[in-house]
Amino acid sequence: MNRKICLSNTLFYTLTLMLAASLLVGNASAQFETATVLGSVRDANEAVIEGATVTLKNVATDITNTATTDSNGDYQFTGVKIGIYQITIEANGFNRTVAENINVTVNARQRVDLTLQVATATETVVVTDAANPLQTDSSELGQVVQRKQIIALPLNGRSYANLALLAPGVRESHTNSSIGGGGREAAFNVNGLRATFNNFLLDGVDNNAYGTSNQSFSSQVVQVSPDAVAEFKVQTNTYSAEFGRSGGAVINASYRTGTNGFHGSAWEFHRNTVLNAVGFFKPNGGVKPPLIRNQFGFTFGGPIIRDRTFFFGDYEGFRQIQKNLVFSTVPTLAQRQGILGFAVRNPLTGVTYAAGTPIPLTPFAQKVLSELPAPNVPGLANVAGIQSNNYQELVLNRNFNDKYNVRIDHKLNDNFSIFGRWSYRKSNAFEAPNIPGPSGSNQNGFVDILNKQFVVGATYAFENASVLDVRFSRSIIDAGKRPPLIGGQSPFELYGITGLPDDPEVNG
């Protein structure tokens, strides 16, 4: 009960402060994915036109917003969702002017300056390419990756954030990488900083997987399918104060929204042993490592109420079963008998055993050696004749993943709109140890992830050109690792070790 009261009070104070800030600082922005469309309206003699009516229309949803130019001939729309827009300007004594194909991107300050012609007859002037391609109203450095790039470019693994590598100063990070694949999802270094310094935003809210990102898990709470990403922006330097919480890059993504038309897509990506190459290191007998991989899903969106309420959702599943070739070092047949190629001294008795002389083995040592596999490849020998990498194993790697998202947008009136999104991701993976059996260590194992995120947002435009943009989100991260031999026979029982605590809560 106390927790609910605390949450309600926190939300109330947050909304109060944001409302006060929006009233005091009309042109301030927040770390959202929405944009600002602004410009000036003048006549052919460069004189400002005051009182002109400017209408901004979203081509996909037909939702419109209206503003009036001020005494300087300027207008501004804030909290604009990304998409293709049309701007219509009407003023007494001038021809009606329409600017088409205005592409508004993530967190942009899109300037569209227009010149009106004196009316000589009832006609409409249509302007194309009126938007300035350069962001002259912002000094931040970054790159927008638009939807057509996300869909058209090949993307192994289908992680949209990996396309951040297209931006200058970004390189892939191999921290926490494994033999079976690359580094953790969406792990990259920007301007020489560590990957954990990056800040991920989705629909204007925090999407960072705190804590688990350092444990080779994903960097993000929600991993949206590329087909469900409208676009995203990689902000690498000199970004404004609202993004100043992290030292690395800001990856600001926007989830797709529904339109007045029903649209959907479906996909299936398949790989198997037959289509896969053998690789440089070949298993014994030259047999290809087995692989079965399926990545499939769909998107669907459209109107619930035309021109007012829209929905969009997606699902993606991932199923992979493969075996990776790994090399390990195990005792040779001579070493199993206590025969070493160099002299050994017993520190307790002071007895020295010459090279090639069998060393007495305790029952415990014999039991440990019996649980280790014998060498199955020649391996490599150093100058002392000690072999390494003399054992080869095809290690099982299994990964099952399901994720889905759904978003609903609703326009209450010309000044007030709201949206909500629910995201869910469940992943179960298993990677077998490099050496089978209890003596081969308890490395690798099971990785279980269950992430959920709920987001609501509201945008209200005041008559004085101020805008209140509020977001509330809750992310739940449930992730953990388990060793592969957990639940089996206790090593204490297997090796006959006594006198130690055997409570599972103590020794695992």
Image (cartoon, helix red, strand yellow):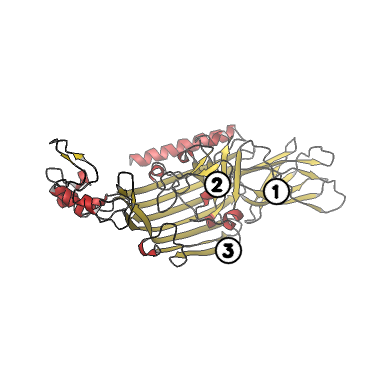
Chain-order first, disc 2 or disc 1:
1
Res 81 seen here: no
Residue 390 in view (yes/no): yes
Q: Which residue is mark 1?
A: 55
Residue located beneath label 3 in the image: 262
The amino acid pointed to by label 3 is: Phe
Can you tell which quarter of the image residue 307 is in? bottom right
Say whether residue 19 is left or right of residue 94. Answer: left
Q: Nearer the viewer, residue 18 or 153?
A: 153
User: Percent from the top left, x then y, of residue 119?
Assistant: 85, 48
Query: Tag 3: Cα neighbours inside 10 Å, few (<14), some, or many (≥20)?
Result: some
Q: Whole-Å distance between the Cαs marked 3 and 2?
A: 33 Å
Query: Tag 1's secondary structure?
Result: strand
Q: Position of residue 95 (x, y in %)?
A: 81, 49
Q: Badge 1, how many Cα within 10 Å: few under 14, some, many 20+?
A: some
Question: In the image shown, does 254 or 498 lie closer to the viewer?
Answer: 498
Which residue is tagged 2? 165
Q: Nearer the viewer, mark 3 or mark 1?
A: 3
Q: Amino acid at mark 2?
A: Leu
